[in-house]
Image (cartoon, rainbow, N blue to C red):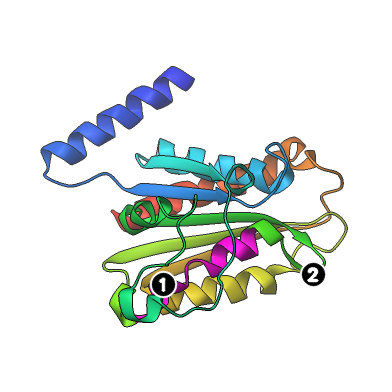
Amino acid sequence: MALKRLCLKIYRTKIKTMLGGSCVKAIGFAGSGRKDGNSTTLLREFLRGASDAGAETKLVFLCDLSYRGCVGCLTCMNTGECCQEDDVTPLYPKLREADIWAFASPIYFDSVSGLMKSFFDRLYPFTHQVGKLSGRKSGVFIVTYEDKPRDDYADVACRLTNYLGWMGNFTTEVLAAGSLGPAGAAAGKPDLLESAYQLGRRMVEVLR
């Protein structure tokens, strides 16, 4: 089955190239310190769906990076670039190239993780006219939490995806998964995994 998916992806990519088009690119950012946690599990499924639909995908673990949040210097208002040079710096061109931005985070203290919030703040350069993104893009925010109803924290993700509209022409989606129980529980919920997978496929197909 895995070989069949790989062959199908290669075939679709070749067809796209022959037609003079470029492959859809999707980049995902995992905001949990656990690489096998619930939010990361769903992000992996999202990216797998995107990959099976023909996209080139990349997964970035924020916990592996060394960076600070926005320092409020406002240099980016004039340059369109962040003045800080750290592990986020090489991600800016990758973000510009990507057609789909996917963010995944557990909910801590009624908000996204500190890793995710600090990283999201570093996207501020894209909100200024000089740094605005071109072309159509899609954004998705996946949030997971242990003991609340399914949609209890969907508004947290909605607020952040709304900010993507400041950066360019984004179509956005939210996947909120609550009442999951302990870390890793999402892996045992096939319906939820399928939802993330199909969302990844759908977002690629919309951009074709």
Q: Magenta stretch: give its range.
A: 116-128
Read off the residue under disc 1: 125
Answer yes or no: is residue 23 visible: yes
In the rendered structure, find residue 85 and report the number of the disc placed on it: none
What residue is at 82 percent from the left and 66 percent from the top? Answer: 109
Q: Which picture quadrant has residue 185? A: top right
Give the residue pinned by disc 2. 110
Q: Main secondary structure of the magenta part?
A: helix
Looking at the rendered structure, the kind of residue marked 1 is Pro
In this rendering, the answer to whether 136 lies above or below 16 is below
Residue 75 in the image: x percent, y percent?
41, 77
- Can residue 1 be seen in the rendering of this structure? no
Give the class, few, some or many, for how many residues have Cα within 10 Å of label 2's Cα (few <14, many ≥20): few
Q: Indicate the quadrant where residue 134 lies.
A: bottom left
Q: Residues within 10 Å of mark 1 (few under 14, many from 20)?
A: many
Query: Does label 2 or label 1 sit earlier along the sequence?
Result: 2
| Residue nearest the viewer, comparing 68 with 203 | 68
In this view, the mark in front (2 or 1): 1
In the image, residue 140 lies at what x, y percent? 52, 60
At x 32%, y 69%, the residue is 133
Amino acid beneath label 2: Asp
